Image: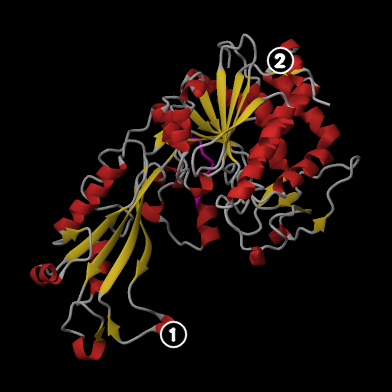
Amino acid sequence: MRRTLPLLILLAAPALGSDAIEAAREYKTHNGPRILRDFAKMLALPNVASDHANIRRNAGMIRAALEKRGVRSELLTLPDASPIVYGMLARPGAKRTLGVYLHYDGQPVDPAKWTNSPWKAALYTRAIESGGKPRAFPKPSEAIDLEWRIYARSAGDDKAPLAAILTTLDALHAANIAPTSNLIFFFEGEEEAGSTHLRDFLEKIREKIDPVDAWLICDGPVHQSRRPQLVFGVRGVTGLQVTVYGATRPLHSGHYGNWAPNPALMLARLLASMKDEHGRVLVDGFYDSVAPLSTVERTALRNLPNIDDALRREMGLAQSEADNAPYAERLLLPSLNIRGLETARVGSRTRNVIPSVATAALGMRLVKGNHPQAMQELVEAHIRRQGYLIVREDPPLDTRLRHAHIAKVIRESGYRAARTSMDLPIVRRVIAATERAADGPIVLLPSLGGSLPLYLFTDSLGKPAVIVPIANHDDNQHAADENLRVANLWYGIDLMASLFTMPADSAP
């Protein structure tokens, strides 16, 4: 029988966020075992981004789940693209519209590396590495231990917020509480494949999403200190493949060593010229376009928990870059990283040769103010200043005979960074609502170190976007034995209840 939630949404009175949080907690108390079992069923459906048949099954399952809860939903399609699950839950008279983004696709799996099947959720008493033991999912009357862990692909990234949202809608329905905002749901199915069609989808339905006042980006983990956090930006990304040349063929190192130039050494010198021993990039102009931090952002940085010493111990590092400069500050500068090197062979495959070519894969993480193409041009200008002729294809013999230093540079695609101002009125409401759900102060992080195409929301659509993570920081996302701590799922339900019922007036 179809539920009457749409009618209840019309009749229900708005509630303060604290009332909604209490309703969510009451609902979890009485329905905890069922919430976990429903989540396990959701995780049992494979969702690797390249598995198009199962991706469509996931989309259909999510659409049906939204429809069951009174959300008017549809699947948006484009040729060769995974569907977008779009949903709209209107609150008559609402003066604000929130967009809610998450992705329902996941990373590939190697089942041999998993303790259990990645497509059959397993419940453990604690994290496996902390001595957790497998146990059955709880019976209807059984108490929930918040330290339990659920192991399955996408348990943390990114079906956790989906489970939180669906449970929140159930809890609000059970308490006859209506959201204070119109809610637009936009769930992507190819984020783990690079969000290739995200821009096209956003443009296709621009009229539908134009009313959104702010986007809630439901992805990522809470802070490494285990404290809840909000994140207001991400770095952009781009890269270059750089190949330098020696002789036209590999040469015997005995016959030609000390005579023929070695491209491996040439490349090492070129790369070393790009960054000093303290981690500062030496490419001219590399930091010039960085947008300055606001006073609010600088205050947020000063208030962050100090995790640097613990991170260095965990990673076996005696020192980090820039003389142990704070981790969060380093995320607000563009980076130049060597992602890979390839030339000749090592180990058991070592041969007495001088290689003919050497290649480096360079990655750049960008911050607000950097443009991908402009940053690539700065690196290319640096390569030219080191005496190299830049080409786009392997050079012919006559070019090699005229130039001692040749670098083939292949530019990779990329996108800009994004950062939302923390002092916008609607952002302050999101902060206050999150603090209510967390029962206290939260971590406010100006930017993540990783990259997402968040600029499509902030720049292309011109709307503020805030990342609202719920997964545990040690969830093994993208790796074997991905997991979700039950306490984090419970927090996510409180968080969504608070966000969906933020005060509609000027009060925080």
Residue 454 drawn at (x, y percent): 45, 36
Magenta stretch, residue numbers: 303-308
Residue 325 drawn at (x, y percent): 40, 48
Q: Name the residue: 26% across, 72% down.
A: 357
State yes or no: discs 2 and 1 in contact (Cβ < 8 Å).
no
- Determine the main secondary structure of the stretch shown in magenta: loop
Residue 488 lies left or right of residue 216; in this view the side is: right
Tell me the CA gap for discs 2 and 1. Answer: 68 Å
Q: Name the residue: 72% across, 16% down.
A: 9
Residue type at tag 2:
Ala
Q: Secondary structure at mark 1?
A: helix
| Towards the viewer: 54 or 424 | 54
Q: Which residue is mark 1?
A: 348
Residue sticking out furthest to the top: 93
Residue 209 drawn at (x, y percent): 51, 23
| Towards the viewer: 495 or 225 | 495
Residue sticking out furthest to the bottom: 255
Residue 493 showing in the rendered view = no
Q: Name the residue: 42% across, 56% down.
A: 320
Q: Earlier in the sequence, mark 2 or mark 1?
A: 2
Name above or below for residue 401 compared with residue 154.
below
Name the image quarter holding the N terminus.
top right
Q: Which mark is residue 15?
A: 2
Name above or below for residue 302 compared with residue 138.
above
| Towards the viewer: 463 or 201 | 201
Residue neighbourhood size for the residue with mark 2, other residues' Cα within 10 Å, grouped as few (<14), some (14–19), many (≥20)? some
Q: Is residue 305 magenta?
A: yes
Q: How many marks?
A: 2
Q: Quadrant of residue 179?
A: top right
